[in-house]
Image (tube, rainbow, N blue to C red):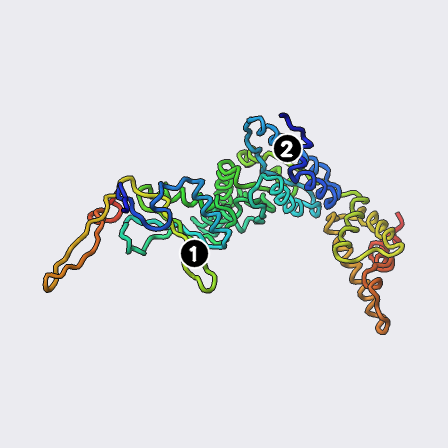
Amino acid sequence: MMTNTGNRVTQGQFSFLPDLTDAQITAQIEYALKQGFAVSVEYTDDPHPRNTYWEMYGNPMFDLKDPAGILLEINACRKTYPSHYIRVMAFDSARGWETPRMSYLVNRPKVEPGFALERQEVEGRSIRYTTRSYAANKPENERY
Amino acid sequence: MALTVADVLAQSQVESVMDELDADLVGLAPVKARIRDIAALLVIDKLRANLGLQSQAPSLHMNFTGNPGTGKTTVAMRMAQILHRLGYVRKGHVVSVTRDDLVGQYIGHTAPKTKEVLKRAMGGVLFIDEAYYLYRPENERDYGQEAIEILLQVMENQRDDLVVILAGYKDRMDTFFQSNPGLSSRVAHHLDFPDYSGAELLSISDKMLGTMNYGFGAGAREAFDEYLSLRLAQPHFANARSVRNALDRARLRQASRLFAQRDRPLTRDDLTTLLPADIRASRVFAAAASSPS
């Protein structure tokens, strides 16, 4: 049985683990750079799993050799948006892939209110389901 | 069990680094001495670590001053390699920039530009050539000062991630440091690159010819020695760069000489040897002959 106490959003890699430490994030970025992925930092405060429109924090960094520079960006993003979701994405531009290969959260709001299941009755008493985040009840930037 | 220095040396690459340095770079005694000190500190730090004594990595930011052609850029490139093999920098790549790569053209342009360069250089060495151009006090719309501020912050806070090497001519670098005391205090190693002596220049020319697959023929080396002593007396001598230019001109003359002999089959020896005539055709000899001192 899957348990997710605390309503932590489980998007991306490592999301069922405790928050990654800076050293662990450095190791992951090191792996991405070694594979030649372009690493970028994105943030949002809309936690819906179908939200793909995260905002970019700076440009993707594809010419860096060392994770220290990217960690600088991540910490700057954490300071600017302390209660947004921040994720690190690694994009593989090799032919045949051309897709993000890694994506993991590096910052979460302190309290994540979780999701509600919305039911809508349609003809013949059929029910259509959707999930809605409790956080989305408030406008952007006032959610956490 | 207390280890000896020899034990640590046997396990690490320090000795091979020092031997390579001695073999590849001619002269440059103060530079080699400083690198030897840094390597010795590394060994002692390892011994201390064995006993559980923690120590901070030393500040490695450097300032290279000297006349043109004394090897500042060359040594900066080698320094990255050396520090990487000694374990002080993580990746060992060099990002070589001048003022234009750090300073923007309009308000708000400088900070992201400088930060991008710094991020690229992390894990390696940032080499700033002609660093004094960053500071332009007479032009109030110049954003060089902003770039310096960002540099200062990163040089202090990310000491473990980045090594900054500044380079330039001595007098202008001295003025630059006087007007930026923050920068001067963050740079721990000020290395002056002395001019090369005649014998050092000759041995540099041997090395250069070796890498280019050329060699001095009989009497050519002595001719070049004479050329150097005459040329040193003339102004605007740029050390190793002038030697390289002189050797290139000698190659041109050799090429012309061989070109003139259309029907002669050229052996490997012919193609790789510089004869005294190729060197004595220089204007330097003619000038010396016409004006006996």
Question: Taking B233 as reference, is A121 left or right?
Answer: left
Where does the image place residue B72, in percent across and percent down from the top left? 66, 45
Give the position of the N terminus of chain B as an image quadrant.
Answer: top right
Residue sitting nearer the eye, B143 or A28: A28
Q: Which disc number belongs to residue B16? A: none
- Which residue is depicted at the point 29% across and 47% down? A9
Residue A90, percent from left and from top: 43, 53
Chain where mark 2 sits: B
Q: Is residue B141 visible?
A: no
The three-letter code of the residue at mark 2 reads Val
Choose between B257 and B141: the one closer to the eye.
Answer: B257
Which three-letter amino acid code belongs to the residue tagged 1? Answer: Phe
As measured in the structure, the alpha-carbon distance from the residue carrying label 1 to the one carrying label 2 is 40 Å
Tell me whether circle 1 and circle 2 mark residues in contact (CB < 8 Å). no
- Circle 2 residue: B43
The single residue placed furthest to the left in the displayed view is: A124
Please tell me whether residue B36 is drawn above or below residue A98 in the rendered image. Answer: above
Residue B84, percent from left and from top: 60, 43
Q: Residue at x 83, y 54 (%)?
A: B284
Q: Which residue is mark 1?
A: A91
- State the SS at label 2: helix
Does B16 sit left or right of B233 as displayed? left
The outermost residue toward the bottom is B263
Image point (29%, 44%), residue name: A8
Which residue is more in the foreground, A105 or B227? Answer: A105
Give x and y (percent) for residue A22: 43, 40
Q: Residues within 10 Å of mark 1 (few under 14, many from 20)?
A: many
